[in-house]
Image (cartoon, rainbow, N blue to C red):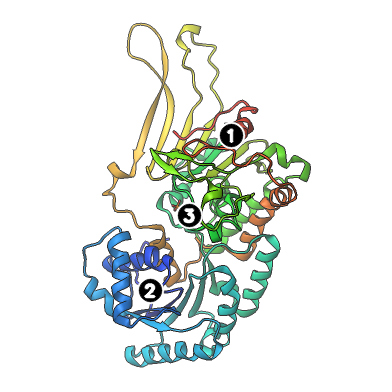
Amino acid sequence: MIPATNQRPAATVLFIFGGSGDLNLRKLTPALYNLFIDKYLPEHFSVVGIGRSKYTDESFRERLLEGVNEFSRRKDGPWNEFAPSISYLQMDGGDAAAYSAISDFVEAKKQEWGESPNVLFYLAVAPQLVPGIATNLAKLELCGDKSHVRIVVEKPFGHDLKTAQELNTLLGGLFAEEQIYRIDHYLGKETVQNILALRFANSLFEPIWNRRYVEHIQITAAETVGLEGRGGYYEGSGALRDMIQNHLLQVLCMVATEAPISFDANEVRNKKVDVLNAIRRIQPDQVKDVAVRGQYGPGKVKDKEMPGYREEEGVDPNSATETFAAIKLFVDNWRWEDVPFYLRTGKSMPEKTTVITVQFKPAPSYAFPGEATGSWEANRLVISIQPAMDIRLRFQAKRPGQTLAIDPVEMVFSYKTAYDGQEPEAYETLLLDALTGDATLFMRADQVEAAWKVVTPIIEAWGHEAPTDFPNYTPGSWGPQAAMDLIEKDGFKWMTK
Ligand code: BG6
């Protein structure tokens, strides 16, 4: 989380493996540039892109500037002041002998700056390259310095529980846990961080944030986009692994966690692991009742023709990969016993929206005459994570007039009207945290494994039985009919507002 003191991190050299890749272009460099503009970067700061492509420092900077011009929230600015801190190291991450260039670079900066810098390694590479790079890095003498060297690992963290455990064992043998920063970019979103503020900086919500008052909770993360050329990765992943195992379960943890006694990284993460461990294990024969998968066929989203998933590049024409998933979970603890949590995510949906709905139980209406209660509704708190960033409290009010009529109305807190609309991007927050050594918003080894345990029965059941109805939803719809049935059989409806 952004430090309240506005303190800058110590001198740092940041190495980005996958430096010439998409993530650096779209997210990392724009984030660093904005941190630079906001004066969060240390005076002594150097970022080195590492990759196999051929660039000079100059041509690499030009390439990154293109990314900034396209993807940064601020485009105009002192790029020429920031650019000299960027350099490029052409290197094959699989070549152990080449790693001495990293130590040499750090040593040169130490001489130049007159102080020993912190070193951050960011692995923005395909998951299969992570073990090799981490192993080679760990051989460098400088990596033994637990308090000054950190490694950031991007998702996907493992392909299932077993591979996540193997990766944790490998990384844990090479680095101390406090050096490992497993990133989940949803946790860096302002509106996701604000869930803890909403719940624990107010006395209004917490007393009713439990099974006594809450009827059910929904978390939807819908995207209008399809594959965006990521067929190679997505085919082996699918919506459950790509979105639910990580982002949506982390959001659920924020909604369901007990109050931490401090914002110490381990205290907050302990509380989240408690939530994941309390999620009721799904038995193999229950999967069909609590989990729905979907895959989009050809059609239109917002008047734009979309190919069906199976026609996308890099996708098997008989693919069983799900582009939509909806699941129902229970958190078996004192606070949440028997309150259903419905999670859904999908590509090629009618709108891009990530939203949490806390549906409260209805108030008794018997005191009011029947004709006044035609629109009777239970209270609802709707937290829009993106793109709308707002919180809406729906409650009932008397419609003005001489006849008694009760209607739902809304009280809205919107970031746009309350603030100046320049919220930092998730990657700005997370990079700054990694630079300052604050791991609160990063995933600990046990957190990742606990999240895999939640989805493992579904992965296994779906793996054993190929879907027979794919494709089963059209682009621009809210997914297959079975997803509506999943929630409607409990007497509820999916909501995004
Ligand atoms: C990524 C997934 O982690 O999150 C993508 O791999 C998805 O498939 C993306 O599109 C969504 O992120 P956001 O921030 O746009 O909601």
User: Which image quadrant for residue 59?
Assistant: bottom left
Q: Crowding at label 3, few (<14), some or many (≥20) Cα neighbours within 10 Å?
A: many
For discs 3 and 1, the disc positioned in front in the rendered view: 3
Q: Are marks 3 and 1 in contact (CB under 8 Å)?
A: no
Local secondary structure at mark 1: strand
Question: Residue 113 versus residue 167: which sits nearer the camera?
Answer: 167
- In the rendered view, does 342 fall on the left or right side of 347? right
Q: Are marks 2 and 1 in contact (CB under 8 Å)?
A: no
**x, y percentage for residue 205?**
48, 38
Residue designated by label 3: 186
Residue designated by label 1: 216
Q: CA distance from mark 2 to mark 1?
A: 42 Å
- In the rendered view, does 78 fall on the left or right side of 292? left
The mark nearer the N terminus, 2 or 3, is: 2
Residue designated by label 2: 9
Amino acid marked by disc 3: Tyr
Local secondary structure at mark 3: helix
